[in-house]
């Protein structure tokens, strides 16, 4: 290799290492700025619809591959005990595939926040970019996030025992671990959401479904779950 | 976007109402407003019930109902007296308790986008009782807003002050902590701006209700801007399905009992009452 080529090669190698480092330093304590702006309101597209760009929803919570013991547990569960009927959060694995789900995404220092039009079932998800997992359990889990180029990768653990993996009552354990990948596609028109569930105690393997949300200009409406549910819990 | 004459005529022909310009001195948003406004804010209690030096809290928490009462029409006072706290307390019903109860007793978070500012309350049952309130910056009022717990809020800038105009309230919320009633003609104008070296968000409310109040009155609050690392606590009205089921049974039973009692007490308005209305 000639001397000039060696210098060029060296410069390229140095730049390749240095540029990402500089980007991270520039973001500094504002890690939410290190990726594309996902702020906006999005509406889940229906299943079975193929978008002009060729995108379509694939898979879903009803297809999780359950271990035999988990299947046995599912059989003991009744639809009348579904948290959705009690206006309680159904958990992100079900909610991100919930029919007609509409989300409202924001970014703020150190985090991405996801609100839901149906906030009874979806609750509120705060995805922290500036800290590791914290102990404890709750309905939507503890979410931490990082950027992989243009994709927001969200890692969630710490789910409470009450939520189900699907409408049929598929169980999860305390080992439930969700990995979600969010990115804008179609020139920013759609939010592609890939949700992977891992649970060594209830699933035979990791399972992923894909959903597409369309960016919309319509507003989030007030929606009180109690007004729809007449005899809750009876 | 320029409004060409052709487009304007077309709109007029189709009877589409073009947004009316506000009658006040609207200015563009302050530069970097999103950076300044996003974050967590303390309630009056959180800030120690003391406004920043040189500022005064108008109608503090403990005086809200007294002031509302002093401004209420007779029917609104009677309605308050007929209100059963336990059964009609929205907070206990896991419903949004309204503007006057959401941000006065605990911290709240402001999230921002170019089109709106969203207030997330954290008192009581979190987003369920303190609610999620969206203030739209990109449009005027809806022509026929649905009647909601937080109303239809639209904001515009006057220099560094955000002026928020809200109508379209349902009549289920209270003007204070203790059953002061309003109608769905409630109209609140808020002026928000940073004071005391940007450390506090000043929040001035002018409360008016031509149907329920004899005249408008003004309240003010000062919310300290908090360190943004403070996590948003997760809160629900009940912690488990069992607790939720138990509450629903209790609530349904109490509601049934109260309706039975009311049937016995129901009085038809007399002719002279109708005249006053």
Image (spheres, coloured by chain):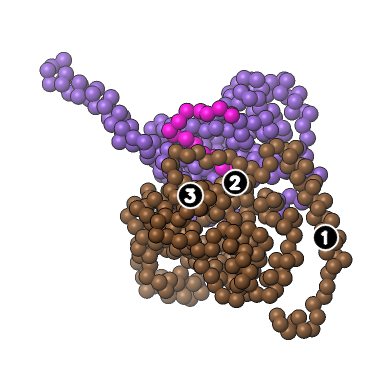
Quick check: marks 2 and 1 in contact, CB under 8 Å?
Answer: no
Label 1 vs 3, first from the N-terminus = 3
Query: Badge 2: few (under 14), some or many (20 or more) residues near its Cα, within 10 Å?
Result: many
Which residue carries the number 1 mark?
A: B259
Chain letter of disc 1 in the image: B
Give chain A's shade: purple
Label 2 vs 3, first from the N-terminus = 3
The magenta segment is: A122-136
Picture residue at 44% right of the left edge, 50% below the top: B224
Total tally of numbered discs in the picture: 3
Residue B19 pos. (x, y %): 46, 69
Give chain B's shade: brown
Picture residue at 63% right of the left edge, 58% below the top: B177
Query: Badge 3: few (under 14), some or many (20 or more) residues near its Cα, within 10 Å?
Result: some
Q: Residue A147's image quarter?
A: top left
Residues at marks 1 and 3, CA–CA distance in whole angstroms: 42 Å
Picture residue at 20% right of the left edge, 21% below the top: A9
Which residue carries the number 2 mark?
A: B126
Chain letter of disc 2 in the image: B
Magenta stretch containing residue A188, yes or no?
no
Q: In the picture shown, does residue A49 fall above or below A66? A: below
Label 2 vs 1, first from the N-terminus = 2
Query: Badge 1: few (under 14), some or many (20 or more) residues near its Cα, within 10 Å?
Result: few
């Amino acid at each position: 290799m000639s001397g000039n080529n060696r210098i060029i090669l060296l410069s390229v190698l140095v730049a390749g290492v240095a540029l990402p480092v500089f980007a991270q330093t520039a973001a500094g304590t504002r890690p939410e700025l290190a990726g594309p702006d996902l702020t906006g309101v999005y509406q889940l597209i229906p299943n079975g619809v193929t978008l002009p760009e060729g995108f379509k929803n694939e898979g879903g919570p009803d297809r999780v591959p359950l271990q035999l013991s988990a299947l046995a547990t599912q059989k003991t569960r009744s639809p009348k005990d579904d948290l959705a009927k009690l206006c309680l959060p159904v958990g992100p694995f079900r909610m991100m595939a919930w029919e007609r789900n509409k989300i409202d995404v924001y970014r703020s220092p150190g985090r991405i926040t996801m609100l839901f039009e149906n906030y009874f079932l979806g609750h509120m998800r705060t995805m922290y970019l500036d800290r590791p997992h914290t102990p404890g359990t709750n309905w939507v889990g503890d979410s931490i996030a990082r950027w992989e180029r243009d994709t927001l990768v969200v890692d969630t653990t710490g789910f409470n025992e009450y939520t189900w993996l699907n409408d049929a009552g598929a169980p999860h354990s305390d080992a439930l671990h969700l990995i979600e990948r969010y990115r804008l596609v179609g020139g920013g028109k759609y939010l592609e959401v890939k949700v992977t569930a891992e649970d060594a105690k209830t699933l035979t393997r990791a399972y992923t479904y894909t959903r597409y949300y369309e960016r919309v200009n319509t507003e989030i409406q007030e929606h009180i779950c109690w007004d729809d549910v007449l005899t809750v819990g009876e | 976007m320029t409004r060409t004459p052709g487009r304007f005529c077309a709109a007029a022909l189709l009877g589409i109402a073009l947004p009316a310009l506000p009658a006040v001195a609207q200015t563009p948003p302050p530069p970097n407003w999103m950076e300044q406004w996003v974050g967590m804010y303390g309630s009056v209690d959180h800030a120690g019930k003391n406004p920043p030096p040189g500022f005064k809290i108008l109608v503090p928490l403990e005086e809200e109902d007294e002031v509302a009462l002093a401004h209420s029409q007779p029917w609104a006072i009677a309605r308050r007296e007929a209100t059963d706290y336990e059964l009609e307390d929205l907070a206990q019903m896991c419903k949004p308790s309204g503007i006057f109860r959401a941000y006065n007793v605990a911290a709240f978070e402001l999230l921002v986008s170019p089109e709106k500012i969203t207030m997330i309350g954290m008192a009581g049952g979190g987003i369920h009782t303190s609610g999620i309130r969206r203030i739209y910056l990109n449009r005027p009022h809806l022509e026929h807003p649905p009647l909601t717990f937080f109303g239809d809020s639209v904001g515009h800038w006057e220099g560094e002050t955000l002026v928020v105009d809200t109508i379209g309230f349902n009549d289920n919320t209270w003007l204070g902590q203790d059953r002061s009633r309003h109608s769905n003609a409630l109209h609140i104008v808020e002026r928000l701006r940073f004071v005391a070296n940007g450390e506090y968000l000043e929040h001035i409310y002018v409360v008016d209700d031509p149907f329920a109040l004899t005249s408008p009155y003004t309240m003010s609050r000062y919310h300290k801007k908090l360190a943004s690392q403070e996590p948003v606590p997760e809160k629900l009205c009940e912690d488990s399905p069992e607790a939720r089921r138990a509450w629903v049974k209790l609530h349904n039973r109490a509601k049934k009992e109260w309706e039975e009692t009311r049937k016995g007490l129901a009085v038809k308005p007399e002719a002279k009452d109708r005249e006053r209305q």
